[in-house]
Image (spheres, helix red, strand yellow):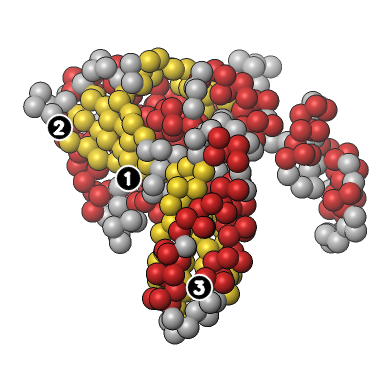
Amino acid sequence: MSVNSRIPGFYKLSPPERFKAIVERSGLPEGELASMVTADGKMLAIADRMIENVVGTLSIPLGVAANFTINGRDYLIPMATEEPSVVAAASNMASVARLHGGFWASSDQPIMISQIQVVGAKDPQAARLRLYERRQDLLDLANEQDPLLVKLGGGAKDIEVRIVNVADKTYVVLHLIVDVRDAMGANAVNTMAEALAPLVAQIACGRVRLRILSNKADLRLARVRATYDCQALGGPDVVDGIIDAYAFAAADPYRAATHNKGIMNGITAVVLATGNDTRAVEAGAHSHAAAGGRYTSLSHYEKDDAGNLVGTLELPMAVGLVGGATKTHPVAQAAVKLLGVKGAQELAEIIVAVGLAQNTGALRALAAEGIQKGHMSLHARNIAVAAGADGDEIEKVVARLKDEGHVRLDKAQTVLAELRQSGR
C-alpha cells in the first residue's frame, strides 16, 4: 500500500484523531506506531499547544551532571541527551576542575540584533547616513512596541547600519540592537523590526524585504575558564596530548567540526533541558567559530606555570528564562528550578561551563585511552537493549561485549541467544 500524505483538515483534528489518520494512510499496523503516543494526556495536551499536527511525544533521557562549581557556587545541572558518556564526561571533568576552584564565567548583557533589509535604495551610502540621523526616532518607535521590556531595563538601545554588496545589488541593512533582559528575545526583536519597517523604507527611499533577528548573537557572548590539575588528568603527557588535540582543531576545519561538536554535546543538552532553542544556540556557536573567515576551534587550551591544563571557551549564548518552552514545558520548568538560576546571564554562564567540561572530557579520552573505550562501554548498554536483552540479561550481554571488544548489534544478538540457550 502506498502512502497518501494528503489529509484535508489534518491540523483541525485532535491528536488521537491525527494518529488514527496517519495509521490509516501509512498502511502500517497500529502497533508499530503506538510508541509515538504518550499515556500522559496532560503532556499530550501541552505538546498540542507547542507545535502543529501533534500525534504524540518523544522522550529524551534527562540526566543530571554533578560536581559543578561555577563562580563559587555549586549546581546540579540537568542535561537532555540521547548520547552515552556526555553526562559522565562533563561530571568527571567538573570534579577535576573543582580541585582548582571550579569554573569561572562571565557574560555580556543580553543583547540581540534584528536586521531590516532595504532593497532598491538609489543612494545607499546617503541612505545609511539618513538612517543614523533618525536614530532616536527609530529607537523610540521600537520601544513603543514593548513598554514592559523597557520598564524592566531593556529595550532598543542603538542601531547600526551596514552596506551589503551582493553581485550587482546593494542592500542597506539596519541592525536594531535590543537588550532583551531574561528572554531569548526572538519575539521581541522581530516585533520591533516589523514595526520599524515602513519608517526605515521611507527614510532609505527603498523597499524593505526581510526584518528578522540574527542568530549570530555576537553581542551576547558568554565566557568560561577552568584549571584542570595535571596529575588528576593523568600526568604531563595527557596534558600535552590535550593541547596537541586542541592545536589540531584550531588549525584544521575537519578536526574543528568534531571538536566543536563535542562542546555542543554539553551545551545543547542543557539548552534542551531548560526548554531553550537548541538550533539558535548551535547556529550562533558555529557562526562564531567561523568569525575570523575560517572555521576553527571554539575553545582554547594552554598550560599554566605549574603544568596544569587551562581551558577557556567563549561563544554566543542566546538563552532565556521567559517565554517559549521554558514556560510551557513542565520538565523544562523543573530543570530551571533545579538549577536555581535567577537570570538569563547566569544560565548562559552555566551552559558554557558544561560545554568546556564536556570538551575537556572528550579531549582527555582522545589523549589517553582513546574515545571508544569509555564511550563504547556506555554505548554497550544501548546495544544490548536494542538486541532484545531485558533485566539482568543486559549486564551479562554488556560484560561479554566488553570482554570480547566488539560492541555491535549482531554480536549482542549472538551473545543474547547463547545466554538464553544456556539458561534453558
**Percent position (x, y) of residue 272?**
56, 35
1 horizontally vs 325: left or right: right
**Percent position (x, y) of residue 396?**
54, 19
**Where is 218 relative to 416, above or below?**
below
Residue at image coords 61%, 21%: 334
Q: Quadrant of the N terminus?
A: bottom right
Q: Nearer the viewer, mark 1 or mark 3?
A: 3
Q: Nearer the viewer, mark 2 or mark 3?
A: 3
Q: Earlier in the sequence, mark 2 or mark 3?
A: 3
Q: Earlier in the sequence, mark 1 or mark 3?
A: 3
The quadrant holding residue 51 is top right
**Percent position (x, y) of residue 195?**
62, 57
The image's mark for residue 303 is 2
> Amino acid under label 3?
Ala
Q: Dots 1 and 3: beta carbons under 8 Å? A: no
The image's mark for residue 298 is 1
Mark 3, other Cα within 10 Å: few <14 / some 14–19 / many ≥20? many
Closer to us: 132 or 265: 132
Q: CA distance from mark 1 to mark 2?
A: 17 Å
**Where is 396 relative to 281, above or below?**
above
Q: Is residue 28 visible?
A: yes
Q: Secondary structure at mark 2?
A: strand
Q: Earlier in the sequence, mark 1 or mark 2?
A: 1
Q: CA distance from mark 1 to mark 3?
A: 38 Å
Mark 1, other Cα within 10 Å: few <14 / some 14–19 / many ≥20? many
**Where is 182 relative to 170, above or below?**
above
> Amino acid under label 1?
Leu
38 horizontally vs 268: left or right: right
Residue located beneath label 3 in the image: 204
Q: Is residue 419 visible?
A: no
**Percent position (x, y) of residue 190?**
59, 53
> Amino acid under label 2?
Lys
